[in-house]
């Protein structure tokens, strides 16, 4: 198993896009965190450190990490290196586990780097724009997230991206599908549900990213949001895993 992890670690950082997207992720995280602090409150009110450290759970940041997440399998399928990987490591369960663990490690490292950027920005913020007290606010709406929620939500988002890539064997779909679902498609479904006068409410209640955001921002009217989102994440991952074991390389 150690050899699998070393192989995946080297493969991860040998891809140029990993470095590029990580840098872009840090830039976007910094800009989203700094904007309200240096350009005025924008109607949000005084920010807190907890709210500031919730910044990198925003979808604009996570889509950058999802590019790397999709490459864990998408890059191999695109260039045919999956055959070389499975020849070197024929036990697919170890390949899958190694890629999943390395994805978690990458998200954790990136999140800590994002917090370091936000911490530096916070120390340079204008006086009275950042407070140690008060509730603060979250770019996703609602209350600021706990730090462990930021990490877990980021990993879950990236795990969905990797799973979609495994299912479709298409790197682009792994990136685009979560982005479209979270930013456009779910919003349209909610609009259609309003027009349907309650006939589509059950669909709205089980939307993956709407529930994920509700859990992330502590919406009290959706107490089961975390469980619903977790069910979607696990479901995508199990389907992708089953297809990975069943299909030929």
Image (cartoon, rainbow, N blue to C red):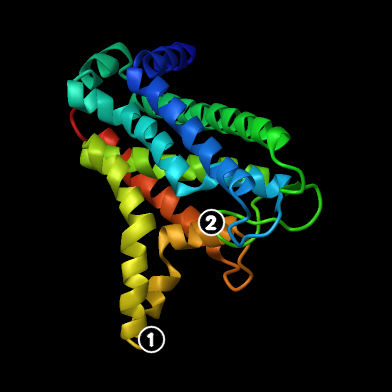
Residue 9 vs 58, above or below: the answer is above
Quadrant in the rendering for residue 141: bottom right
In the rendered image, which quarter contains the C terminus?
top left
Instruction: Name the residue carrying label 1.
Output: 198
Q: Residue at x 63, y 55 (%)?
A: 41
Quadrant in the rendering for residue 84: top left
- Looking at the image, residue 211 sits to the left or right of residue 79; the answer is right
Q: Nearer the viewer, mark 2 or mark 1?
A: 2
Q: Nearer the viewer, residue 152 or 95?
A: 152
Q: Residues within 10 Å of mark 2 (few under 14, many from 20)?
A: some
Instruction: Name the residue carrying label 2.
Output: 140
Q: Residues within 10 Å of mark 1 (few under 14, many from 20)?
A: few
Q: Residue at x 33, y 60 (%)?
A: 184
Residue 157 visible in the picture: yes
Residue 102 vs 30, above or below: the answer is above
Element at badge 2?
loop
The percent coordinates of residue 242 (x first, y second) are 31, 41
Quadrant in the rendering for residue 224: bottom right
Residue 243 visible in the picture: no
């Amino acid at each position: 198993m150690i050899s699998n992890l070393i192989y995946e670690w080297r493969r991860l950082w040998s891809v140029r896009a990993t470095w590029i997207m990580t840098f872009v992720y840090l830039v976007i995280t910094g800009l989203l965190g700094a904007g309200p602090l240096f350009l005025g409150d924008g109607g949000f009110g005084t920010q807190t450190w907890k709210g500031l450290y919730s910044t990198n759970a925003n979808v604009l940041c996570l889509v950058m990490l999802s590019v790397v997440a999709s490459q864990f399998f998408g890059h191999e399928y695109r260039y045919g290196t999956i055959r070389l990987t499975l020849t070197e490591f024929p036990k697919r369960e170890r390949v899958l586990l190694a890629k999943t663990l390395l994805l978690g490690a990458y998200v954790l490292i990136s999140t800590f780097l994002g917090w370091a950027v936000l911490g530096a920005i916070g120390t340079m913020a204008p006086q009275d724009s950042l407070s140690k007290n008060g509730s603060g606010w979250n770019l996703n709406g609602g209350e600021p997230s706990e730090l462990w929620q930021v990490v877990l939500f980021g990993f879950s988002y990236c795990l969905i991206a990797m799973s979609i890539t495994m299912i479709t064997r298409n790197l682009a779909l792994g990136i685009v599908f979560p982005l479209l679902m979270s930013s456009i498609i779910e919003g349209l479904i909610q609009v259609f549900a309003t027009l349907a006068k309650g006939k589509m409410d059950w669909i709205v209640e089980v939307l993956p990213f709407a529930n994920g955001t509700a859990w992330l921002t502590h919406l009290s009217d959706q107490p089961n949001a975390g469980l619903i989102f977790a069910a979607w994440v696990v479901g995508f991952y199990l389907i992708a895993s089953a297809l990975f074991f069943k299909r030929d390389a």
